[in-house]
């Protein structure tokens, strides 16, 4: 049974409503909430985070002077909060969030991030991968600010340019939905969706390496900045999907 709180927004969690009513029809709830995946609704949502609990459950890293990863309540998406990644201005010049999951059968899997850019940047880098205890199989995506070039990396870690002209828009700080879908069983990419644009990746193999560790699924998002600058982006949500088609 689901109880829907009245008299406040759906994303408001801190104060009780004046009354509560039984919501018998789960279909109504689905319609009310809608799908957070606006441009690609395929697949089942296994897990999602819109950072209402900050970065709890995430690992955060970075390199360089001024690098920072923090929770902010400004320029958010559907949640009251977002996570800001500020890349360091020297050294390796990046900021990162990463999340580990226990291994489970997910079929074709996808990772979607909602990202808004506060500044220019060098490139945004996303990984989705599976470890079975002996091997890591990875989907690897890089989106460059210069030229808007979009690359994925194959089994030999060779880059394939699959598109160009990506623009974070004017004004900046508009959220873009970026979803990468892979097939860990066949070892192949499936597709990439960036906003309304979809790219067929089914002829490109996933990166593979031998590695002995605990079985898991992992997602990574890095922002690499320009030398001498503290470039920044905002992450509004992260969604892990399974049973993609």
Image: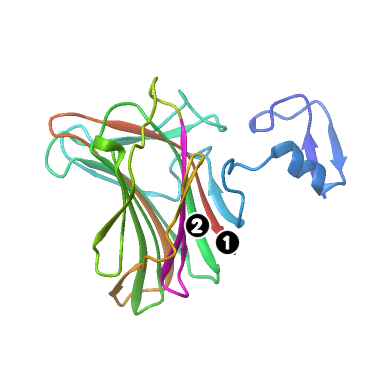
Residue bearing the label numbered 2: 110
Up-down relation of residue 213 to residue 51 (above or below): below
- How many discs mark residues in the rendered view? 2
At x 59% / y 40%, what residue is drawn?
38
Q: In this view, does 16 lie to the left or right of 167?
A: right
Q: Which residue is drawn at 23% across and 38% down?
A: 122
Please give the name of the residue rendered at 80% of the width and 25% of the height, measured from the top-left corner: 18
Disc 1: which residue: 244
Q: Distance between the residues labelled 2 and 1?
A: 7 Å
175 left or right, relative to 154: right
Residue 148 drawn above or below residue 99? above
**Secondary element at tag 2:** strand
* Residue 32 spot, x, y in % from top left: 75, 37
- Front-most of residues 217 and 110: 110
The magenta stretch spans which residues? 175-192
Judged by its main secondary structure, the magenta piece is strand
Residue 180 in view, yes or no: no
Q: Pinpoint residue 49: horizontal percent, then vertical percent.
A: 52, 45
Considering only vertical position in the picture, is 126 above or below 167? below
Which of the two labelled residues, at mark 2 and mark 1, occupies the earlier sequence position? Answer: 2
Q: In which quarter of the image is residue 184?
A: bottom left
């Amino acid at each position: 049974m689901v109880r829907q709180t009245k008299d406040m927004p759906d994303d408001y969690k801190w104060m009780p409503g004046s009354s509560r009513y039984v919501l018998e029809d789960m279909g109504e709830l689905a319609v009310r909430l809608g799908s957070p995946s606006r441009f690609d609704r395929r697949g089942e949502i296994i897990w999602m985070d819109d950072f209402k609990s900050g970065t709890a459950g995430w690992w955060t890293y970075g390199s360089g002077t001024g690098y920072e990863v923090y929770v902010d309540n400004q320029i958010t998406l559907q949640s009251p909060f977002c996570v800001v990644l500020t890349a360091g201005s020297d050294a390796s010049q990046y900021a990162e969030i990463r999340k580990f999951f226990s291994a489970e059968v997910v079929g074709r899997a996808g990772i979607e991030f909602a990202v808004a850019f506060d500044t220019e940047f060098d490139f945004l880098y996303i990984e989705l991968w599976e470890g079975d205890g002996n091997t890591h199989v990875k989907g690897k995506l890089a989106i460059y600010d210069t030229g808007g070039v979009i690359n994925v990396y194959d089994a030999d870690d060779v880059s394939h340019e699959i598109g160009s002209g990506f623009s974070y828009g004017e004004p900046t700080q508009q959220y873009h939905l970026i979803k990468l879908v892979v097939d860990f069983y066949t070892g192949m990419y499936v597709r990439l969706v960036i906003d309304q644009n979809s790219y067929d990746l089914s002829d490109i193999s996933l990166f593979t390496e031998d590695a002995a560790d605990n079985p898991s699924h992992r997602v990574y998002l890095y922002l690499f900045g320009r030398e001498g600058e503290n470039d920044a982006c905002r992450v509004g949500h992260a969604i892990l999907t399974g049973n993609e088609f």
